[in-house]
Image (cartoon, helix red, strand yellow):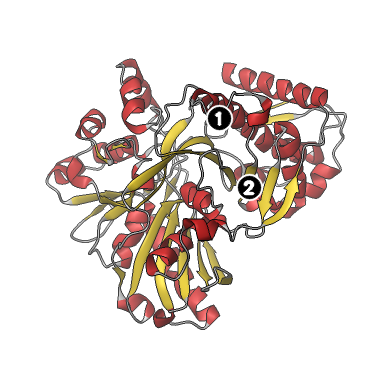
Amino acid sequence: MTHILAIDQGTTSSRAILFDGEMKITATAQEEFAQHYPASGWVEHDPGDLWTSTAATCRAVMEKAGLKAADIAGIGITNQRETTLIWDRATGKPIHNAIVWQDRRTAETCQALKKQGHEARVGDLTGLLLDPYFSGTKAAWILDHVEGARARAEAGELAFGTVDSWLVWNLTGGRVHVTDATNASRTMLYDIHRGEWSQELCDMLNVPMALLPEVRDCAADFGMARADLFGAEIPILGIAGDQQAATIGQACFQPGMMKSTYGTGCFALLNIGETPVASQNRLLTTVAYQLDGRATYALEGAIFVAGAVVQWLRDGLKIIREASETQPLAERSDDGQNVVLVPAFTGLGAPYWNAECRGAVFGLTRNSGPAELARAALESVGYQTRDLLEAMRADWAATGAGNGGEGDAPTLRVDGGMSASDWAMQFLADITGAAVDRPDILETTAMGAAWLAGQRAGLYPDAAGFAETWALERQFTPAMDEARREGKYAAWKRAVAAAQAF
């Protein structure tokens, strides 16, 4: 058994990637699936699409590489987090579409819980904020809006899961109902200090504990993928939510190391070690990974719209045909214009957490056109990342690990689709004043899942050995002068304040 099969189930597509014994990519396969928007601010997926696209890409990548199940030592899974499914334990049929992490339909529920004074307690137990982003209120919404669902859930007839749980259920033919600690920590139902589901939180959010999966380490035995799928059984040996998998794939195993992934959204994680730190700046405290029963924690800042802003240029405004056209457009833009785009299409994430805010563009002139909008779109990702870095620096200083000064800005390891844009990464370095390191392998999310499974299978080295294999492709260093950097960032802050006021 010489290979690891990594499943990367994302928001807009499912991918399967085969890694060889040297952790090199052998082959990849990808399949997009439909997004469903039943109402303003609502986002859903057909659960069948999540599963069939995953199974199809796994079979396709094995065929492309000429490998059989006997060649694969294990499967590692990484997934879009917080996306919520509930299905019938007897039939395996979902009772509702998956409610996607971007969905804001439970904003009023979260506001009501805040008014009842629950946010502090939720933060204490979960490290999260009361926001519709997380899974708990989504699960309650499904139970309340599907006839008979709540009674069936209380009777133990239904199963709840994030996407990893749904995939494992289908891979194993319904024999295994599990999740890992990273995905559990994103549900708003999991006590990250005790490492277990919380009865108090389940009661608060009105989610029966009978729904919940068993929580295991990120590298563990999650059951066997059934033989009829791939010709023989394959063990499932690793699971981590996509952002935690990228943290692992970037080898951020030491406190103070930080990564930022630019996919549909942008997610920055700062390793804070084995003691969770409560953020004073509206960041999240989350499980970065759990190995051998010991959790390592991270501060996380979540931006809802990063790569999705480029999709908006393509699919909404139709000013580009391919994402790759964005950089050349930005390079041709008028440097004298200061067009600022606040891409709050589904609300603002960290550190604002304003579910009701919507997108806005400021600074338009008669000369503003596609080039200026493309530039503003790419710059918006840099601005939002700086928001996160400012908050992280303050929280990191509070741990006693740094003094909060400029020198405490960690080097940022980047990955994800948008990190391939030299223009965007140079602007990121310029606006944050921090070095930006892009690795040789940008598939860090899949790499993290593969390493978890490969290490469990005995094919890959331990964490220290894996960290030694991390290789730099290019470092971007700040080149913008301080006055321009601070002037542009001040304009961004004014734009965000105006968008929130509207």
Please tell me whether mark 2 sits on a helix, a strand or a loop: strand
**Label for residue 79?**
none
Please tell me whether mark 1 sits on a helix, a strand or a loop: helix
Q: Quadrant of the N terminus?
A: bottom left
Identified at 33% across, 37% down, the residue is: 192
Q: Is residue 45 left or right of residue 21?
A: left
* Viewer-closest of 461 and 201: 461
Observer able to see residue 289: yes
Identified at 79% across, 41% down, the residue is: 370
Q: Is residue 89 left or right of residue 62?
A: left
Residue corresponding to mark 2: 414
Residue 120 against residue 190 in the figure, above or below: above
- Residue 49: name its quadrant: bottom left
Tell which circle, 2 or 1, labels the residue nearer the N-terminal end.
Answer: 1
x and y percent of residue 489 in the render? 72, 25
Residue 500 against residue 332 in the figure, above or below: above
Q: Residues within 10 Å of mark 1 (few under 14, many from 20)?
A: many
Residue 239 against residue 501 in the figure, above or below: below
* Kind of residue at disc 1: Met
Q: Is residue 463 left or right of residue 174?
A: right
Q: Residues within 10 Å of mark 2 (few under 14, many from 20)?
A: many
* Kind of residue at disc 2: Val
- Residue 388: name its quadrant: top right
x and y percent of residue 387 in the render? 61, 28
**How many numbered discs sit on the rendered protein?**
2
Residue 407 against residue 476 in the figure, above or below: above
* Viewer-closest of 366 and 139: 139
Q: Is residue 265 left or right of residue 420?
A: left
Residue corresponding to mark 1: 392
Identified at 60% across, 57% down, the residue is: 470
Label 2 – label 1 distance at C-alpha: 16 Å
* Viewer-closest of 436 and 88: 436
